[in-house]
Amino acid sequence: MERFQYTRARTVPEAIGIAAQSTTAQQSAPIRFVAGGTTLVDLMKLDVERPTRLVDINHLGLNAIERTADGGLKVGALVRNSALAQDPAVMRDYRVLSEALLSGASAQLRNVATTSGNLLQRTRCMYFRNTAMACNKREPGSGCSAIGGENRTLAILGTSSQCIATNPSDMNVALAALEATVHLQGTKGTRAIAFQDFHLLPGDTPNRETVLEPGDLVTHVTLPPPRSGTTSRYLKLRDRASYEFALASAAVVVEVAGGRFRYVRLAMGGIGTKPWRMTAAEQALTGAPVDEATIRQAATLALRDARPQSQNGFKVELATRCLAHALRLATGMASV
Amino acid sequence: MSRARESSRAPGAPEAPKVIGGKLPRIDGPLKVSGRAVYTSDVSLDGMLYAVPVPSTIASGRIVSIDAAAARKLAGVRAVYYRGNLRPFFRSAPPQGFSGLIDEKRPPFEDDVVRYYGQYVAVAVAQTMEQAKAAADAVRVRYAADAHNVEPHLATEKPFRTESERGNADAAFQSAPVKIDQTYVTPTEVHNPIELHATVAAWEGDRVTLYETSQAIMNHREVLYQMLGVPKENVRVVSHFLGSGFGGKLWPWTHSILAAGVAREVGAPVKLVVSRQSMFQTVGHRPRTQQRFRIGAGHDGKLLSLHHEYLNQTSILDDYGEDCGEATPFMYSVPNVRVISALAHRNIGTPTAMRGPGAVPGLFAMESAMDELAIALNIDPIELRRRNEPQQDESSKLPFSSRHLVECMQVGAEKFGWARRDARVGAMKRDGLTIGWGMAACSWGAMRSDAQASVEIARDGTVTVTTATQDVGTGTYTVLALVAAEATGISLDKIDVRLGDTSLPPGPISGGSWVTASVIPAVSNAARVAVRSLLTMSTTGPNAPFAGAKFEDLQFANGRVSRKRDPSTGVPIGEVLARANARAAVGDGQSSTTLGGEESKKYSLHSYGAQFAEVSWQPETARLRVSRFVSVIDAGRMLNPKPARNQIEGAVVMGIGMALFEEARYDKRYGAPINSNLADYIVSTNADAPPIDVTFLDHPDPVLNEFGARGVGEIGLAGTAAAITAAVYHATGVRVRELPVRIEDLLRG
């Protein structure tokens, strides 16, 4: 762990002003915001992140959950995961988000982890976290140890020849299905980023994970108004019953009318290098009858582009089944 | 600090608990739950420095150079040691019995060869742990790497060694009407006690005190005095509380020797706490095993031949044999048996004993094969085992001291509801899920080792029990207090038990589930001798209250000495001792090992049990959970059923991990155990622990000790994985022979 300077920011402009001096807002950023610290402090102890300055944003407010003018929800960046999961409006209108949050980490971690921190959660790829081994995400150009290595838990969608690391967040999967918007404030003012544009594919620059630039502070996330008549569910599959990252997970938001899918939003986790929207399957399902054959077909279609590694070929089948079963749960075709 | 109990009674503790066989909470519980129990890494001494080792980042090769210049310049750094600037250590002599044991025999820095990833190549010493860590990270080591081998598939390097043989297992197998021939694999498992290994070393002149996370302090001293090259009496080892060890803390590891060596060199006390990552590399593990198990049987299910052929991984440095065939020769009645073993050397750290060593992986293979035989024969697996129940240990031809396996299975079947089982795969449903049931038998050796103990009864009526064993967290403090209370008639709240210090009378290791059986006779004897010494003082000497009386005519009860025929003549203990001008009545006691002793020549000494598992299976998502468990254990008389039950429950939870989750994965290219943390090495969580029904048959085993008690620390893990994989097969139709069961396997179901 490196020595660092700690600054408690009192205002948003102050935090942004300090962070704007950073050379990057991505991997190896010399200046980092810290909120819950559940990812960052771990990575600092492992020497994966070596910031020289931490800007504590815990005292900036940004911790409210409010209705927006259009009937949606505005979630402050510093709302803790447990508070968000147990918010009555979230439990009522965005069940998939509550379920996703509660399926992640442990109660202790959820009590400190924040919305923006979860949004920026780093991969659990074992090579990223081990400085003795090559990793393009940690050290660009050093190589990817995961390709040809222990990659059972890693991605089958969105990978590149440089990186196959999975985005580990459960919350992100729900936010993708809910078509959330990420709101930033930076040196040039505020920006609103559609959720699916917020995270980047690894490509040749796996060290760049989001659109964030130096000084950009995530201030809040907004959710569109809940659609009446929709049901939403989150299904997470993993080895043990609790406290483990997903091997495959699915967030589904569906509206059924007259025995047909009228509205479908699907996203998956544990299998992609970023939270993965399943748009082809959404289109295939919309207007189609709610039956087993349709669901299976759509789930198979969703994984059509999967590119497994040496150890994670099973994830294609597992993810297909995961998405199909999440759809069964959301449509009442299954109860467990 | 050595007192395991607070001075006042814990709130809610029973006033006068029934002593033996009651359900007494641990007497050390209040200290532990309030954070006041001082564990090794809590020890803090004046002027203490911190040591952090530098682990190698290759698995095989030579150290070319070590550059510590940058590390030495960092704040707070006192020294960086490596081969050449630290006084060399000696190797210890081969062990005698259970003394002088060490698994990784090479002292640190003995040569410049690296034989496994994570081997310590240097150590940094600084004023704070953080400074020492920064310095260790700043040490630059250049290596000349050689090819390493961490290949999981195991092949023999030398001819198999015969472990046990009778009849002609090959011929009987060839001619058997029904055959099972399968290979079972158990992976590298890491103990992962919650308490990290740690050493605090403090020298005074040429004497050293080592605060250790040790399950065997006497052995630790025996090894360390030799390796440090000092007289034995100059080494004191202290281990008051342990956050468990599961066998990983039995024998000394390199960090302990390093801590002692650098403390001597730097001239200050040194604390060294092993990192979680290093605990996957430098403090042992259960080695990977690969076991071919052949059974030949008649159509009636009668066993004709058992052939158990197994290999285990060991390190390049040491030949560690995992005794997988331990239970094979005596478990069932069968005329032809062959058990053979071999080692496969790999560039990994040296393995060591892990909870139920040998028997746990071995019984996974044997009991899985028995389940496969039951299916092949279409015989109920309990009935199959009943038909092969032996009348004696057919290997040693000795009677069993106490064996109630059939009763374990009967009681378990009743508790579990086994009669309602539909044996067809996938036939049982509940709440929209498929249910699978499986069972397995198990055994674990019963032994007693040498032990000494002292008991003092003081003027104020308090009792002090001392013995240099240690409480690994299982309740040894409590059980010894119980025994002393029973033997002296003095109430539990007046009994102080002191353990975990080599300056006390030599006690046994906390391993093999032996402590209870070993040390209670010593304590019981010592207590009786102390009482007799009190009675003798009552009858002899100028001021004796019962001068001239025979001590046989006296009794000690309720803190008073009196004539047996007239309890009203009672004299308080304080007065007896005052009149004799004695500080205390004292007694020493001992017990001797069964190893090579009379009992082991006359009896086959083992505990038995039956494990029943239920799994629930969601076929669409391949989601499998253990939903219910019944364990029936025949381990003699239970002295304190509460912590004993806790041992079985904990072992079952560990067995769920063994069956479904745990595996250290080695990256073939780096040779490193890559999932070396508790997020990537998956163990059971609370959410994975189902309702566990534990029953002790409570039949005393009179051979081991007067209380008829055997230990329960390990047997709960034996057979558990086999019961679970049998249940997995029943639910899914997938027979998993290579642990752990993975979603990958289940997707085939």
Image (cartoon, coloured by chain):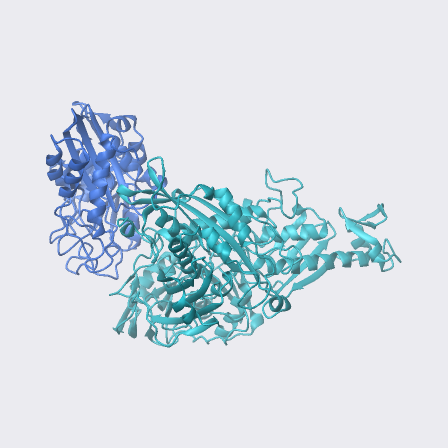
Task: Between residue A256 and residue B325, name the one nearer to us.
Answer: B325
For residue A141, above or below residue B92: above
Task: Between residue A6 and residue B206, name the one nearer to us.
Answer: B206
Q: Is residue A128 left or right of residue B129?
A: left
The location of residue B513, given as percent across then percent down, is 54, 58
Residue occupying the point 55% across, 58% down: B470
User: Could one spot residue B386 in this view of the protein?
Assistant: yes
The location of residue A182, given as percent across then percent down, is 17, 36
User: Could one spot residue B585 in this view of the protein?
Assistant: no
Residue occupying the point 60% across, 67% down: B600
Position of the N terminus of chain A, as image quadrant, is bottom left
Q: In this view, does A155 lie to the left or right of B617?
A: left
Position of the C terminus of chain A, as image quadrant, is top left
Q: The blue chain is which one?
A: A
Q: Which colour represents chain B?
A: cyan
Task: Between residue A219 and residue B257, name the one nearer to us.
Answer: B257
> In which quadrant of the rendered view does residue B517 lie?
bottom right
